[in-house]
Image (tube, rainbow, N blue to C red):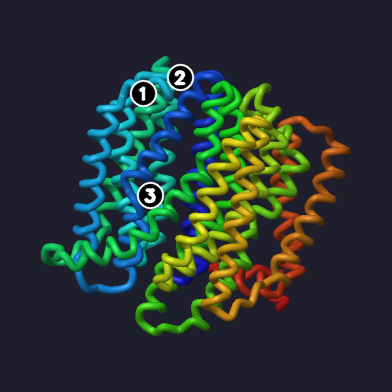
């Protein structure tokens, strides 16, 4: 399967996931209310952190070892190590349930432990599939999980089960996806040896900080905000974060698709030039959607937020800061993912140390002084540091050739789109139906403009479409 095809499959699956989550979030925010939805978000943030602790870098290590060789049974050794860590953490959570319930604002430790089990299972299944070069299959599990979750959550919440229905939907959705994904996993014959566990440990001892970095980027601000602001503010912040993350989907799809390919090239052919070429491709398209997303958010983000409820409009500036942060972080992940693929997690470890320490200090300090704006700014500064660090170390390994021209054309196309959307808003008004029309029209204008401006983009689209567009004939 071509890299572009795989990336598109992953992207479309995430798009379906985001749409399902978008609809479910609207129902949850309007049915549960800002405060109770904020409590749900806090529980999910605690779940995310406990998941990171239970994994301790194992998913990255499993994906790397499975992807680079057919020798050894890293599927079973990874599963044994993973669920051993889960069992240990589950006991610790149960012992500390009084403190945990107090922080979350709800008696839900036992629910958290069940949610942790299914989260560990689905991540493990997706990790193994990615390592076995089945990214297109693991990608399909994402919309399966989110669609199942959303349908059950919406049904149970509307039936009056409240926040309990939201938790139940989460568990069922992850369980269904993990069950389906496990069918496609190929398990090598034979029992794992000590060598497999040692090789997993040798990679995980550096990659664990990368998982902390990703988790801090995803939810450190939410955890810190929980100590300073009400759950209603957290609900608004989370909605803004989810919208910003929607724009970053394609960049994440590229990174996830190319990692096993880079890893295999590194272990078999040792071709740095070939890997550097793939890195250039990932950088060229990492901002393909988030650049126009940032421009569009600046123009109509205030109206889009009102879809969740009248109180969510206050998150407009937070949305802009977080979207810019996601743009920077997306580029940094391309560098760090490539460095990890060539088996140098020790270098990404240094970048992750800088990110983790700065993110923690800045979040606490800036949230204390500037409330939720401080959280968004802390995330942006930390993302900038990760981008600079990733570039520095990647430049030590490869002969980097940053595709500034392609990135510049994306900004130019976004500028053309911005002019059309701005005029449309001035002429047609700013109602929700009008904004939905402007968003769709703006997307069409952006991609048509980019097709005209960029020969490279025309070639990429032509290579990955199953049919020929007239505009693409002009090469």
**How far from the left and from the top, in percent, is residue 283?**
60, 67
**Alpha-carbon distance for marks 1 and 2?**
31 Å
User: Which residue is label 3 attached to?
Assistant: 141
The numbered mark, 3 or 2, whose residue comes first in the sequence reads 3
Q: Secondary structure at mark 3?
A: helix
Q: Quadrant of the N terminus?
A: bottom left
Q: Quadrant of the C terminus?
A: bottom right
The numbered mark, 1 or 3, whose residue comes first in the sequence reads 1
**Taking 156 as reference, is 270 above or below it?**
below
**Alpha-carbon distance for marks 1 and 3?**
34 Å
Residue at 39 percent of width and 17 percent of height: 161
**Alpha-carbon distance for marks 3 and 2?**
26 Å
**Taking 260 as reference, is 10 above or below it?**
above
286 or 87: nearer the viewer: 87
User: Which residue is label 2 attached to?
Assistant: 158
Q: Secondary structure at mark 2?
A: helix
Can you tell which quarter of the image residue 429 is in? top right
Residue at 20 percent of width and 59 percent of height: 77
**How far from the left and from the top, in percent, is residue 426?**
87, 38
Q: Residue 348 got which mark?
A: none
Q: Nearer the viewer, mark 1 or mark 3?
A: 1
Report whether 431 appears left or right of 214: right
Task: Estimate how packed mark 3 is, as few (under 14), some (14 to 19) or many (20 or more) residues with alpha carbons within 10 Å.
Answer: many
In the rendered image, is residue 89 in sight?
yes
**How far from the left and from the top, in percent, is residue 218?**
51, 44
**How far from the left and from the top, in percent, is residue 129?**
33, 59
Report whether 382 appears left or right of 100: right
Task: Estimate how packed mark 2 is, as few (under 14), some (14 to 19) or many (20 or more) residues with alpha carbons within 10 Å.
Answer: some
User: Which residue is label 1 attached to?
Assistant: 99
Q: Secondary structure at mark 1?
A: helix
């Amino acid at each position: 399967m071509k890299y572009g095809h795989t990336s598109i499959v992953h992207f479309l699956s995430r798009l379906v996931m985001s749409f399902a989550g978008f609809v479910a979030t609207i129902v949850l925010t309007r049915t549960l209310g800002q405060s109770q939805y904020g409590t749900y978000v806090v529980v999910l943030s605690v779940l995310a952190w406990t998941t990171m602790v239970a994994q301790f870098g194992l998913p990255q290590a499993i994906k790397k070892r499975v992807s680079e060789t057919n020798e050894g049974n890293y599927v079973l050794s990874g599963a044994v190590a993973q669920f051993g860590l889960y069992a240990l953490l589950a006991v610790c959570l149960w012992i500390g349930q009084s403190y945990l319930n107090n922080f979350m604002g709800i008696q839900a430790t036992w629910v958290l432990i069940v949610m942790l089990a299914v989260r560990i299972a689905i991540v493990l299944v997706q990790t193994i599939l990615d390592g076995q070069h089945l990214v297109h299959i693991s990608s399909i599990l994402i919309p399966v999980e989110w669609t199942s979750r959303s349908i059950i959550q919406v049904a149970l919440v509307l039936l009056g089960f409240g926040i309990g229905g939201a938790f139940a939907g989460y568990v069922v959705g992850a369980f269904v996806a993990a069950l389906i994904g496990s069918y496609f996993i190929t398990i090598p014959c034979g029992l794992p040896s000590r060598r497999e566990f040692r090789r997993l440990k040798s990679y995980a001892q550096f990659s664990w900080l990368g998982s902390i970095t990703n988790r801090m980027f995803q939810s450190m601000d939410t955890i810190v905000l929980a100590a300073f602001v009400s759950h209603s503010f957290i609900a608004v912040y989370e909605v803004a974060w989810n919208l910003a993350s929607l724009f970053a989907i394609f960049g994440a799809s590229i990174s996830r698709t190319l990692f096993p390919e880079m890893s295999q090239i590194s272990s078999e052919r040792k071709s740095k030039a070939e890997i550097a070429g793939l890195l250039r491709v990932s950088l060229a398209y990492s901002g393909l959607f988030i650049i126009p997303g940032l421009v569009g958010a600046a123009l109509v983000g205030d109206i889009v937020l009102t879809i969740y409820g009248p109180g969510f409009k206050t998150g407009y500036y937070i949305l802009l800061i977080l979207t810019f942060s996601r743009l920077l972080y997306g580029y940094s992940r391309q560098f760090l993912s490539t460095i990890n693929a060539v088996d140098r997690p020790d270098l990404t470890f240094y970048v992750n140390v800088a990110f983790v320490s700065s993110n923690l200090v800045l979040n606490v300090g800036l949230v204390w002084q500037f409330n939720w704006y401080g959280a968004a700014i802390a995330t942006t500064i930390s993302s900038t540091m990760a981008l600079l660090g990733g570039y520095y170390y990647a430049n030590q390994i490869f002969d980097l050739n940053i595709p500034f021209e392609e990135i510049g054309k994306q900004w130019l196309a976004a500028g053309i789109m911005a002019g059309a959307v701005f005029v449309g808003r001035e002429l047609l008004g700013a109602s929700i139906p009008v904004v939905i029309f402007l968003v769709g029209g703006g997307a069409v204008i952006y991609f048509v403009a980019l097709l005209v401006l960029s020969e490279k983009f025309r070639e990429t689209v032509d290579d990955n479409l199953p049919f020929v567009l007239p505009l693409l004939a002009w090469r």
